[in-house]
Image (cartoon, rainbow, N blue to C red):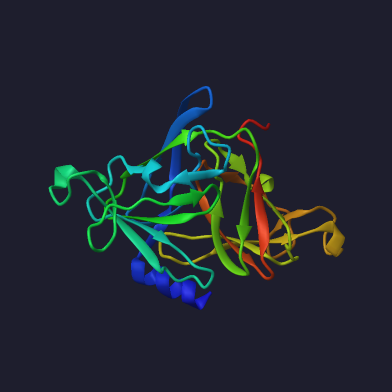
Amino acid sequence: MKKLMTSLAVCAVAGIVSAQSVVSANVVGYNNVATVAGLNLYAPAFTTVGTNAQVGQLSAIRGATLSDGDQIQFMDADGNIPLIYAWFTAAGQAVAVDGWYDGDFNLVDATLPQGVGYFIYAQNPGSVVQNAGEVKDQSVTTTIPTGLGAAGNATPTARTLSRLVLGGNATDGDQIQFVDADGNVPQIYAWFTAAGQAVAVDGWYDGDFNLVDGPIAASQGVLIYAQNGCTLTVPSPFAI
């Protein structure tokens, strides 16, 4: 966790994104997410149109009003940020085509698994990130490595914390962590199961073993700390 906090503090984390409404026709749509200045933990909610795979493209995440030089950052299981791309626009005159660029100003694209979280670094508050594509009528399951994983509500509809369920090799005491505007993690809940005999109901618990719940906005990112790796499942956006 120290490595995570170091890398977040250096990058000046400034909170979690908030989502706006989704406009869609059939199973195709988009959502706009307003950022705060600094880092925003973000989980893309759409997949590539016309495919069966639960993957999207980096190019489908657009800086609707991002500033040139704003970044998307990819985190590893140790909390470090080994890969960063920057957003540039033709209007800014540094590039000919709006998009994400590497350090040599090469336009880049990549396949992004639905459900994995990323950090968006925005220089200005109120910048808008737009994600578009197909809405899958199925749950989203994200594999979390041993250690830290960035994930989130990878659907275009608001959910509640209780709908984010750990599975796979999940261990009682695995955590969900929310990052605040200073890059700290003041809000942490732990996953416990009835099978572990510490609680009567599977779910997320605070430090006093109170079962907790609360809203998780569309595309809101979280950190999952898994002792032995696990999965995080979010239900279909069409599920009640």
Foreground of the two, 186 or 105: 105
Residue pushed farthest front? 51
**Residue 115 at x, y = what percent?**
55, 49
**Residue 32 at x, y = what percent?**
40, 37
Task: Note whether 190 is above or below 2 in the view shown.
Answer: above
Task: Note whether 97 is above or below 72 in the view shown.
Answer: above
Report the residue at 35% width, 65% height from top. Answer: 12
Report the residue at 39% width, 70% height from top. Answer: 9
**Residue 34 at x, y = what percent?**
37, 43
The quadrant holding residue 89 is top left
Q: In this view, does 12 lie to the left or right of 55?
A: left
Q: Is residue 228 left or right of residue 19?
A: right
Quadrant into which the C terminus falls: top right
**Residue 148 at x, y = what percent?**
57, 67
Residue pushed farthest top? 25
Report the residue at 60% width, 34% height from top. Answer: 237
Report the residue at 78% width, 53% height from top. Answer: 202
Q: How many labels does the image show?
A: 0
Residue pushed farthest left? 93
The quadrant holding residue 146 is bottom right
Task: Note whether 22 is above or below 109 in the view shown.
Answer: above
